[in-house]
Amino acid sequence: MDTRRFVFVVARDDGLRRSIAFALEAEGLLVMSSGSLRTMREVSGSAEIGCAVIDEDAISSEEDGWHLVMGFAVPIVLLADRLPTMPDTFRGTILLKPLLGERLVEAVARSLNPKVRSK
């Protein structure tokens, strides 16, 4: 498994989750997905995750959502409807919805390989 390209997608909305996974898989990336941050936490102990794409609704649906996100030791691409209130220590990439596939793929590529720059 090419762990540099392994992406975990977390989105409560099944359609959004499948759409994101499809866009990333079309670029040749390996994808796992879930509707729950807790599932990602459980899987991260046994799987090599290169980065995570997390929808803000998945964070707000968990009582300790930001605590869970800040505990992940991988780059995060956060999908948001608006600029969310978040911990000062959050250093991920924020993409505002609606998403364009190209912006998502570029953000994931930068997260997986910080040397990659936008076009």
Image (cartoon, rainbow, N blue to C red):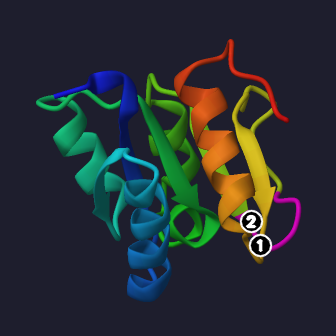
Q: Nearer the viewer, residue 91 or 4?
A: 4
Question: In this picture, is 46 found above or below 20?
Answer: above
- Label for residue 40? none
Q: Nearer the viewer, residue 67 or 97?
A: 97
- Residue pointed to by mark 1: 97
Q: Amino acid at mark 2?
A: Ala
Q: Nearer the viewer, residue 89 or 19?
A: 19
The residue positioned 49% from the left and 64% from the top of the image is 23
Image quarter hosting the C terminus:
top right
How many C-alpha atoms fall within 10 Å of the one at disc 1: few (<14), some, or many (≥20)? few
When asked about the image quadrant of residue 79, the answer is: bottom right
Question: In this picture, is 61 found above or below 119?
Answer: below
**Residue 111 x/y as whole percent:** 60, 29
Task: From the image, give the main secondary structure of the stretch colored magenta.
Answer: loop
When asked about the image quadrant of residue 36, the answer is: bottom left
Q: Amino acid at mark 1?
A: Lys
| Front of the two marks 2 and 1 | 1
What residue span does the magenta drawing correspond to?
80-84
When asked about the image quadrant of residue 21, the answer is: bottom left
Badges 2 and 1: C-beta atoms under 8 Å apart?
Answer: yes
The residue positioned 58% from the left and 40% from the top of the image is 108
**Residue 54 x/y as whole percent:** 53, 56
Q: CA distance from mark 2 to mark 1?
A: 6 Å
- Residue pointed to by mark 2: 80
**Residue 84 x/y as whole percent:** 82, 59
Q: Which one is earlier in the sequence, the residue at label 2 or at label 1?
A: 2
With 36 as the anchor, is 63 left or right in this view? Answer: right
Number of numbered discs: 2
Question: In this picture, is 53 found above or below 73?
Answer: below
With 106 as the anchor, is 75 left or right in this view? Answer: left
